[in-house]
Image: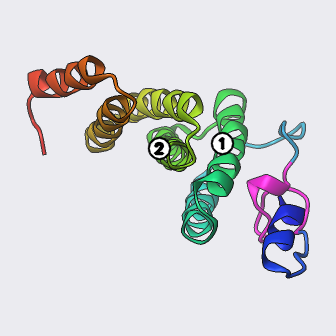
């Protein structure tokens, strides 16, 4: 990614450190699997994921969905692995799921923008599951709205209508 980015702007990109932490490194710098002895994930992890989301949104605004979508999918894959394998402090479990849902939604949107429809659909489903784990009804409705729009755009009006009717049946619409 750093080489592709440097090639598109003519600037040299200096790679960051190796592994997530307070040093300013990102999840993109981290190995795919957490190192042994990773302690419980806490507030720092949530802050790091939120920072990743902001960075992805900046990438999307600058380089578009083709770049941002791939980066977002990679970051989500690593975050998902952490959520599935690392110990998470119970006090923040819902928050971890909520920020994971937001990350998946941002990935889905960028991938949709890039025309990567199957991967966008997968990310939306991941986001939806994490919204439900987090109990985040507002984000769940937002993801469902995006899913309905995407289905309609792809020429699947029945799927889009089914999603809309599901939301209407549940009530409590925004």
Residue at 38% x, 35% y is: 150
Please state which of residues 55 and 135 is positioned toward the viewer in this rendering: 55
Q: Relative to residue 155, is residue 56 drawn left or right?
A: right
Residue at 26% x, 38% y is: 141
On the image, the x and y values in percent for residue 18 come to 91, 59
Q: Relative to residue 159, is residue 85 drawn left or right?
A: right
Residue stretch in magenta: 16-30
Check disc 1: other Cα within 10 Å, few if <14, some if 14-19, many if 20+: many
Check disc 2: other Cα within 10 Å, few if <14, some if 14-19, many if 20+: many
Q: Secondary structure at mark 2?
A: helix
- Location of residue 66 with respect to 83 vertically, above or below: below
**Residue 73's disc number:** 1
Residue bearing the label numbered 2: 105
- Location of residue 85 with respect to 47 vertically, above or below: above
Residue that lies at the very extreme toward the front in this rendered image? 155
In the picture, the quarter occupied by the N terminus is bottom right
Q: Secondary structure at mark 1?
A: helix
- Location of residue 113 with respect to 168 vertically, above or below: below
- Location of residue 97 with respect to 59 vertically, above or below: above
On the image, the x and y values in percent for residue 112 come to 50, 43
Of labels 1 and 2, earlier in sequence is: 1
């Amino acid at each position: 990614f750093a080489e592709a980015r440097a090639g598109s702007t003519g600037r040299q990109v200096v790679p960051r450190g190796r592994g997530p932490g307070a040093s300013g490194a990102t999840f993109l710098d981290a190995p795919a699997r957490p190192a042994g002895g990773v302690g419980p994930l806490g507030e720092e992890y949530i802050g790091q994921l939120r920072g990743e989301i902001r960075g992805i949104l900046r990438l999307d605004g600058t380089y578009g969905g083709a770049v941002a979508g791939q980066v977002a999918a990679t970051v989500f894959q690593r975050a998902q692995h952490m959520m599935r394998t690392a110990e998470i402090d119970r006090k923040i479990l819902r928050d971890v799921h909520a920020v994971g849902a937001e990350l998946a939604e941002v990935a889905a949107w960028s991938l949709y923008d890039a025309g990567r429809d199957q991967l966008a659909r997968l990310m939306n489903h991941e986001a939806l599951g994490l919204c439900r784990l987090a109990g985040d009804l507002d984000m769940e409705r937002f993801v469902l709205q995006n899913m309905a729009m995407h289905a309609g755009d792809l020429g699947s009006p029945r799927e889009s209508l089914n999603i809309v009717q599901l939301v209407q049946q549940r009530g409590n619409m925004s």
